[in-house]
Image (cartoon, rainbow, N blue to C red):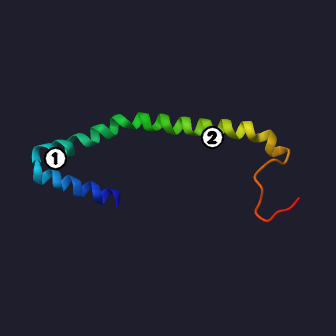
């Protein structure tokens, strides 16, 4: 759905101002390549914080403080 909306907006831009639409079509891969390292850094930091959270919660999980199962009684 997102791709279809992007294509529709590009077609409207092509009708209204075709040089700008062609420029956007040419520059889009370059913008995507420039943003790729930032995405990789974001994925890396997300994984790092998930790992740190798991390490910090490990003692509580070992002592039985993990998430409760639905319907389980102690």
Residue at position x 22%, y 54% from top? 9
Q: Residue at x 29, y 60 (%)?
A: 4
Q: Helix or strand or loop: what does disc 2 sit on?
A: helix
Quarter of the rendering containing residue 57: top right
Badge 1: how crowded within 10 Å, few (<14), some, or many (20+)? some
Q: Could you tell whether 33 is left or right of 59 in the image?
A: left
35 relative position to 13: left or right: right
Residue at 72%, 37% in the rendered image: 55
* Numbered disc total: 2
Q: Residue furthest right?
A: 74
Q: At which x and y percent is residue 71?
A: 79, 65
Residue 50, numbered circle: 2
Q: Is residue 3 above or below residue 50?
A: below
Identify the residue at horizontal 34%, vertical 61% (top origin): 1
Using a 10 Å C-alpha cutoff, classify the residue at mark 2 as few (fewer than 14 neighbours), some (14 to 19) or many (20 or more).
Answer: few
| Residue occupied by mark 1 | 21
Foreground residue among 49 and 70: 70
Q: Secondary structure at mark 1?
A: helix
* Mark seen at residue 71: none
Task: Give percent across and percent down for residue 47.
Answer: 58, 39
In contact (CB < 8 Å): disc 2 and disc 1: no
Spatial CA distance of label 2 from label 1 is 41 Å
Task: Give whichever of discs 2 and 1 has the lower sequence position.
Answer: 1
Image vertical order of residue 13 relative to residue 43, above or below: below
Residue 16 at what x, y percent from top left? 11, 51
Q: Relative to 15, is 4 on the left or the right?
A: right
Residue 33 occupies quadrant:
top left
Q: Quadrant of the C terminus?
A: bottom right
Q: Up-down: is 2 above or below 51? A: below
């Amino acid at each position: 759905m997102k791709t279809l909306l992007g294509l529709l907006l590009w077609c409207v831009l092509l009708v209204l101002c075709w040089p700008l639409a062609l420029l956007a079509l040419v520059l889009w891969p370059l913008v995507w390549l420039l943003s790729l390292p930032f995405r990789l850094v974001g994925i890396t930091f997300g994984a790092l914080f998930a790992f740190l959270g798991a390490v910090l919660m490990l003692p509580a999980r070992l002592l039985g403080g993990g998430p409760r199962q639905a319907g389980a009684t102690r």
